[in-house]
Amino acid sequence: GVLTVEIEHVDVSTMERLEQQGVDCQPKASTIRIIQDKYLQKVHFSRHGIPLPDFMQIDDLEGAKRAGDLFGYPLMIKSRRLAYDGRGNAVAKSEEELSSAVTSLGGFGRGLYVEKWAPFVKELAVIVVRGRDNAIVCYPVVETIHKESICHIVKAPAVVPWKIRQLASDVAHKAVSSLEGAGVFAVELFLTSDGQILLNEVAPRPHNSGHHTIESCYTSQYEQHLRAVLGLPLGDPSMKTPAAMMYNLLGEDEGDQGFHLAHQMIAKALTIPGANVHWYDKPEMRKQRKMGHVTIVGPSMGVVEARMNSMLVGRGYDGQPASVPPRIGIIMGSDSDLPVMKDASKILTMFGVPHEVRIVSAHRTPELMCSYAASARDRGLQLIIAGAGGAAHLPGMVASLTPLPVIGVPVRSSSLDGMDSLLSIVQMPRGVPVATVAINNATNAGLLAVRILGAGDPDLLARMSQYQEDTREEVLRKAEKLQSQGWESYLNP
Ligand SMILES: Nc1cncn1[C@@H]1O[C@H](COP(=O)(O)O)[C@@H](O)[C@H]1O
């Protein structure tokens, strides 16, 4: 008999599986046709004014050459259907390579089109959800890092300027608004060196770039998909952990050896704080096949990256050896500030906050100051305490080079009793704040830093309450002693 199933939309791997089983997958509705045929998908999006790399259909070698003349090389040649994880794509680096590239894709009969090479600096993705009532919510923008055309690592949120995140969300929102159907859509994007966002493609389904949402967001992409298709209210897509990274467990070898290697990795992942292992239990192990994934969550991207590095030691992720990454940087203009600035470090050690201590001078090492401040956030620092004396420009300059909060410590210098340092630090122009503590009071800088971090770290805030309670009790104990003994014996015990 004939079984007719009507589906609103279907992803390419399902299509491929159905075709392998001899099921005729000719779509009926126009929406389905647009999503299945990547060329028609692009035509559709460009009609809706969504930015994407230039593209054109090619039917023969002459057409491919014309496209090469128009777009230049390297030229991306793509199959119109059944292409994913790098399959169905071929790059021709020159006109001579066109015909072999076309042959590798199965010839023109399969339906090909070409795309102008997108000179991207990062690949981004946004999971967009659309309800039956057409309500749309977007998950935070993520960065996808590919290796040999297969997604390797996903960073959530993407470490890109806020404006870029907004632009990426806008493009993704617009792309999904232009389609029909309810459910989760994954929008893959290119970020170019001149800050443009170009649409790569839209996958109408829960997606690899959204796996992190299971642990890092209030509503996972899977729950969200069910809510959307069932007509329930959409859930909150925002992140409940500050940072997450997902690592795909790809088959590293065939058969048993492949399982052995994967299990080694899983055993390592189980020792990593914040790591969650997902194993798909696919019956067969193949090289480069997605067998599972690990999502690591943590309090900052720096911490999550360090955890990822320690999981991947010896596996070629570009990180440094794992150590506890500092959350706070204590910097000072000279080693002569150290006797004062050490008090900030003492407080942070007491509260168990990992930190680093460095000498960075605004006047003697201006380049170092710039690179330190500019890279601080990406290295995972959450706050900077900067101390200096005299013409104390360090805290203010650092504050102008980073979005992180900066606390300034005026260090007393020999000639003006520290008033020069205090005024240099506290009198900042509008727009560039530095929280300034009392002259030489690095202890307060440490305590203020703990309070600021505590706003997003309940454990730290609880410790701060305990510290206040302990301080109060100490004072009360002294007051009682003074009252019971009198001041003379108090002073001369
Ligand atoms: N403003 C400034 C720029 N570079 C160093 N300083 C400050 O100059 C003071 C004297 O430094 P030194 O003892 O090294 O001469 C220190 O407080 C130091 O922060």
Image (cartoon, helix red, strand yellow):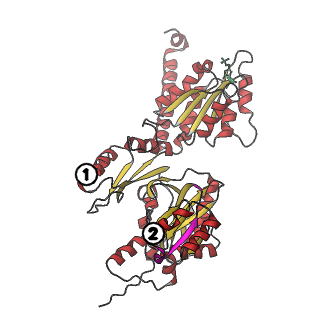
Please give left or right for residue 110 compared with residue 137 in the image: left
| Foreground of the two, 84 or 79 | 79
| Foreground of the two, 445 or 162 | 162
Q: Is residue 51 above or below residue 27?
A: above
The residue beneath circle 1 is 257
In the rendered image, residue 160, in percent from the top left (x then y), is placed at 59, 51
Q: Is residue 413 above or below residue 263?
A: above
Is residue 55 a member of the stretch shown in magenta?
no
Q: Report crowding for label 2: few under 14, some 14 to 19, many 20 or more residues within 10 A (C-alpha).
A: few
In the rendered image, residue 137, in percent from the top left (x then y), is placed at 54, 67
Q: Is mark 1 within 8 Å of ligand 1?
A: no
Q: Report crowding for label 1: few under 14, some 14 to 19, many 20 or more residues within 10 A (C-alpha).
A: few
Q: Residue at x 62, y 39 (%)?
A: 374
Please indicate, yes or no, whether residue 172 appears anywhere in the rendered image: no
The residue beneath circle 2 is 103
Query: Residue reaching furthest front?
Result: 96
Residue type beneath disc 1 = Gln
| Foreground of the two, 15 or 448 | 15
Q: Label 2 near label 1: C-beta < 8 Å?
A: no
In the rendered image, residue 297, in percent from the top left (x then y), is placed at 43, 49
Please give left or right for residue 370 compared with residue 296 in the image: right
Q: Which residues are magenta?
A: 107-120
In what quadrant does ligand 1 lie?
A: top right
Q: Is residue 111 above or below residue 242?
A: below
